[in-house]
Amino acid sequence: MSASTIIGKSIPLADAPGKVTGKGKYTDDLSVAGMLHGRILHSPHAHARIRSINTSRAEALPGVKAIVTGKDASMPYGVLPIGHDECALSVDKARYIGDNIAAVAATTPEIAEQALRLIEVDYEPLPAYFDPLTSMESKDNWIHDTKPNNIEKEYHHEFGAPEAALASSDFVREERYYAGEINHAAMEPHSTLAIWEPDNRLTVYSSTQVPYYLHRTLGEVCEMPMSQIRVIKPLVGGGFGGKSEVIPLEITAGVLAKKARQAVKITYTREEVFYAHRGRPITIIEMKMGISREGKINTVLARVIQDGGAYCGYGPVTVLYSGALLGAIYDIPNIRYDGYRVLTNKPVCGAMRGHGTVNVRFAFEALLDALAHDVKLDPADVRRINLLKAPCVTVNGLRVTSYGLPECVEKVVERSGWNQKRGKLPYGRGVGIACSHYVSGAANPVTRSNMPHTTVHLKIDRDGAVTLYTGASEIGQGSDTMQIQMIAETLGVNMNRVKIIAADTELTPVDLGSYSSRVTFMAGNACIEAAKNMRAQIYAAVAKRLNCEVAELESRGEEIVSSKNPELKMSFDKAVVAAIDFRGALVASGAYTPPEESRGGKFKGAGVGPSPSYSYSAQVVEVSVDTDTGHVHVHKIVAAHDCGRALNPLAVEGQVIGSVYMGLGQALQEEMVWNNGRLMNPTLLEYRIPTTLETPEIECIIVESNDPEGPFGAKEAGEGSLAATIPAVANAIYDAVGVRINTLPITAEKVLAALQEKKRKSNGNDGGSINGAAR
Amino acid sequence: MEKELIQLTVNGEKRELAVPAHKLLLDVLREDLGLTGSKRGCDDSSCGACAVMIDGVPMLSCVAIASCYQESSITTVEGIAQPGTLDPVQSGWADAGGSQCGFCSPGFLISAKALLDRNPNPTHEEIRDALSSNLCRCTGYMQIYEAVKLAIERGKAIRAGDRALAERSS
């Protein structure tokens, strides 16, 4: 067969023309005649009983068309079946500063704002919890009556004999790590336009990663059949997990539209985005690791506490990922994991790029680096020594089908000049290495349903246009382009023949959404299946016309050709007409459900972590540390990522570099700063994501392990590289100046304090690590 | 709310509008002129997504009072190129992966276009400095640099009148 012109070629994203001309429409760009403007009243108290709400003065304001409070949307919901603890507007209590109390729809934004100030809320302030460690010891005034001690969920997993393995290890280290809270800071603030249609249906345009979940939740809270609700996802200006569960404004807009019987748009301010949050939680990690003299990891024991904020959200999934993905990267026979998701009176944490894995990976890779120094081995060698022997099933039940990590390590070592630099650069300059991995979609859906995770439909009519109907949500990662590639490649046609209609619940079948890096693997496979089903119909007609066997037919270059006799061929256009013959358009469907054997073990919590496939990343970071100021300057990051197969290298590189960039922000400069539940930096001026000036050269090396079940061998590329960046930076700082910083972000102040501390006790060779003990 | 009549020259067209005296240029563009290419990404002029060119200089339309710019020529992302065509900076952006989610792209394109208009052959450092007032959360900026460099090459080819080269690099 001739080489593909579509798979493995760098292809500009299909929606790029709209994005570079300003013509592409995001939700806030949409408006309809007579549209009302919605605004939400947020709680000024971190924890308070709502005694009463008086909206009469606000209602009397001319231009106010609807006001809603908790009693208008009292059905609790949540992304997890076990976590329906949240109402779009609070019914009984405010549980964090920023919690949603009431909402107004008015003819202008100014009138809506003015009306909010006229709503009188009688609060009874309650004792509040801001620190997870204090909160989990609480005896009363719990945030939710159903959650004693403010513990949302705890999990305790043990595989092998971790304590015994620790005792028999040659070297053991125990460290405490802390990671500050991080926000996605997608450039597009959340926005929802809810339109009450003349026939009493509801149409909702929203900046969402998961139209299907929004569709379901709107049905529940608005008490309407899903068939009467249409959810459409326009262009989405970045998600990173922040739009992967239903956000209060989405429901509130729907409830307001239903009450006003008009169209209502709500767009968050940036400050509201920070308080709506759903980002990466403050995480405290106490980790022990035992390693042999030869560098083999015997065991890891992790106790992880996450500050989840005031509602469940994705919390239990986050804390399960933290434990599950201790596995599936290295060969570790003994694992103990104790994970606690704790409620506090703060905005809700949730899924963020690298969901659950990032902070624990930081701890693991930093601790492994310290142990590598204990056993006097090259940290790259320690990683080589502990590689999995894939394909395999890990001790915690994760099935690894393809494993490019060995090649990732070799590539970054070579490309970064690791062997020439590690431990050999002048004082103040150093290199660090770390690895990470991530799922290509969750093998078990949070919805606990057996329906396919993705379904797509294809239609071809007499004009020869191939139309793909897919629920998958393009959020900037390139999924529309990927799906067009899958269809065009399988049908052997040019990409411009394929039109895509996506993420509109009235037209497109269910896809579970753009999260956990599932779309390439799942929608990609569904597209291939649909195209093969379509191809079978075309081949049957062509074989009849050409008097040949179906089995000898191939599709390429806009033709159907016999592999036995190249003279026997038919153009795609003619083949389509032949196949349609006297009936209507050709239609075909495809679906994807993860195979049973990928779905993990049977223990409690085993459902989170299993994936049809895992991506792998290795990175080397080179830094300079200013020993007078503690400032860390990153010179270059080399990142190798095993994406199975790069369907579109341009998109893969963009995803990998973007992940590294986001990891770098968390490593050195991003943190949400809290004061009694109030965010001190709810702006992009003070929550400092890296600009061009703070971002070093990031080089992406693509590694292709060709996953046996991935679409053309592909697996995820959009998240897995984030986690390695943070420990690689920390390890590079150690190589540069001999101090280990165990709290994120690694600010200049922390580095300077550690350097001064090291100077004071200059007799140790342990490089400032506080609890580290070799024996 | 009391309105006043103002005249703005936007993308080469003179437009007459009745708007409140304090109305921000970004809101006038988006709400009164339907030019939604310019985006609001923040509350405090920190993200750059709203950038437009005012007399060739990139400025934040979210902190500009529209009525103050009646003597100026305003260019938004919609006006960078003639309808149906792409400026090299736009085609470079699309082809090099400068846009992922694309929300920041209009602001970046304005900054990049303004840079290349005044300096058609900038160094890497000059590109980095010129784009430092725009935030992108997706790309990590590497493919944005590639986009600008592609635009430089295409611009050179166009100026040299070498259509063949322009096509080869497109």
Image: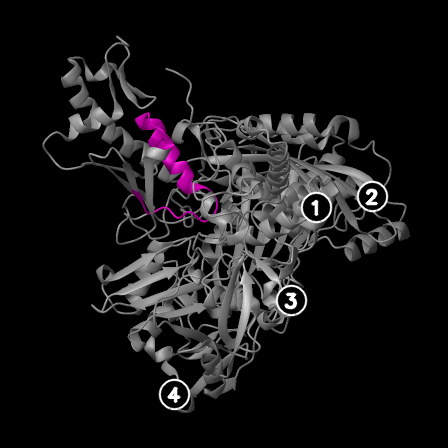
Give the CA distance from mark 1 to mark 3.
Answer: 26 Å
Region in magenta: A469-495
Q: Identify the mark nearer the N-term, 2 or 3.
A: 3
Of the numbered discs in the image, which one, if any, rests on residue A517?
Answer: none
Q: Position of residue B126 (x, y in %)?
A: 73, 45
Callout 1 secondary element = helix
Give the CA distance from mark 4 to mark 1.
Answer: 51 Å
Lateral position of residue A578 relative to residue A83, left or right: left
Q: Dot 2, crowdedness within 10 Å: few (<14), some or many (≥20)?
A: many
Image marks 2 and 1: residues in contact by CB distance under 8 Å: no
Callout 4 secondary element = helix
What subunit carries mark 4? A
Q: Position of residue B14 (x, y in %)?
A: 52, 63
Residue under the image location 45 percent in, 39 percent down: A440
Q: Identify the mark nearer the N-term, 4 or 3.
A: 4
Between A184 and A172, the residue placed more toward the observer is A184
Q: Is residue A56 above or below residue A323?
A: below
Give the CA distance from mark 2 to mark 1.
Answer: 29 Å
Q: Type of residue at label 2?
A: Val
Give the CA distance from mark 4 to mark 3.
Answer: 33 Å
Q: Dot 4, crowdedness within 10 Å: few (<14), some or many (≥20)?
A: some
Which residue is the site of mark 3? A681
Marks 4, 1: nearer the viewer: 1
Q: Type of residue at label 4?
A: Glu
Of the numbered discs in the image, which one, if any, rests on residue A737?
Answer: 2
Between B32 and A399, the residue placed more toward the observer is B32
Marks 1, 3: nearer the viewer: 1
Of the numbered discs in the image, which one, if any, rests on residue A59?
Answer: 4
Of the numbered discs in the image, which one, if any, rests on residue B128?
Answer: 1
In which quadrant of the rendered image does the N terminus of chain A lie? Answer: top left
